[in-house]
Each structure stands twice: as structure tokens, then as C-alpha cells.
Image (cartoon, rainbow, N blue to C red):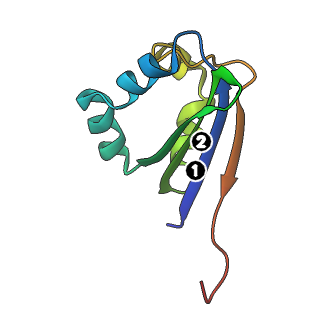
Amino acid sequence: MATEITVLDFKLSNTFSEYCTHMNAPEQQKMFREMGVKTFYIGECIGDSKRATVMFEGPENVLYNIFISPETKPIVEASGHIYEETKITRWKNNCPNC
């Protein structure tokens, strides 16, 4: 299975610090490990502290399929992530020499 980078750009209902605390909590990190997903960047928007981006690396489609499932909306929003209007971009390396 190919590795995919999934980038989420979204608004926050809480502070960036509270969001980071949630994302870095042991139970969250355990869940990501079980899915085979790594969080490798969490950033606060310069000039808009209520906007964040997160970059994940994991098996193709895993995080995307979980995120778009309506059943996961309450779990996503528990972190302070505002589900609506989230921009999702997905990336994979198709370069044979990279």
C-alpha cells in the first residue's frame, strides 16, 4: 500500500494550545499508531490563531476515509477542530527516483 500525506486546514473552536494538548495526548497518539498514521506537523496560522493545519503520514486512504465518515465528526470536533469547511489535500510521491 502506498504512503499518503494528508493535510487538513481548518478552523478551531478552542485555542491552538488546547488543540495541541488534545492531539498530543497519549490516547490520541495510541489511536494514530493503531491506524498506522503519524502526525508530523501541527501549525497555527500566522495572523489567525483560530486556524490550524495538520499534516499526517500514513497508508493511502486511511486518514481520509476516517475523516470523511459522518460517524467520526463528534470525535474530530472533541479536539476543537471545526469539521465544516475543512480543506483536505492528499499527496503521494509518484517519482520513481525520489
Q: Position of residue 6 (x, y in %)?
A: 60, 48
Q: Residue at x 51, y 14 (%)?
A: 15
Q: Residue at x 58, y 39 (%)?
A: 65
Q: Residue at x 24, y 31 (%)?
A: 26
Of residue 23 and residue 49, the one placed in the foreground of this image is 49
Does residue 26 appear to the left or right of 7 in the view shown? Answer: left
Q: Which amino acid type is shown beneath numbered disc 2?
A: Tyr
User: Could you tell me which secondary element the residue under label 1 belongs to?
Assistant: loop
- Which quadrant is the C terminus positioned in? bottom right
Q: Position of residue 62 (x, y in %)?
A: 51, 47
Label 1 sits on residue: 61
Say few, some or many: other residues with alpha carbon within 10 Å of mark 2 (under 14 / 14 to 19 / 20 or more).
some
Q: Residue at x 37, y 51 (%)?
A: 36
Label 2 sits on residue: 64
Residue 64 position (above or below residue 13): below
Kindly report the distance in space between the C-alpha atoms of the residues bearing marks 2 and 1.
5 Å
Q: Position of residue 88 (x, y in %)?
A: 70, 39
Q: In the picture, residue 60 is in which quadrant?
A: bottom right
User: Could you tell me which secondary element the residue under label 2 belongs to?
Assistant: helix
Say few, some or many: other residues with alpha carbon within 10 Å of mark 1 (under 14 / 14 to 19 / 20 or more).
some
Residue contact at pointers 2 and 1, CB within 8 angstroms: yes
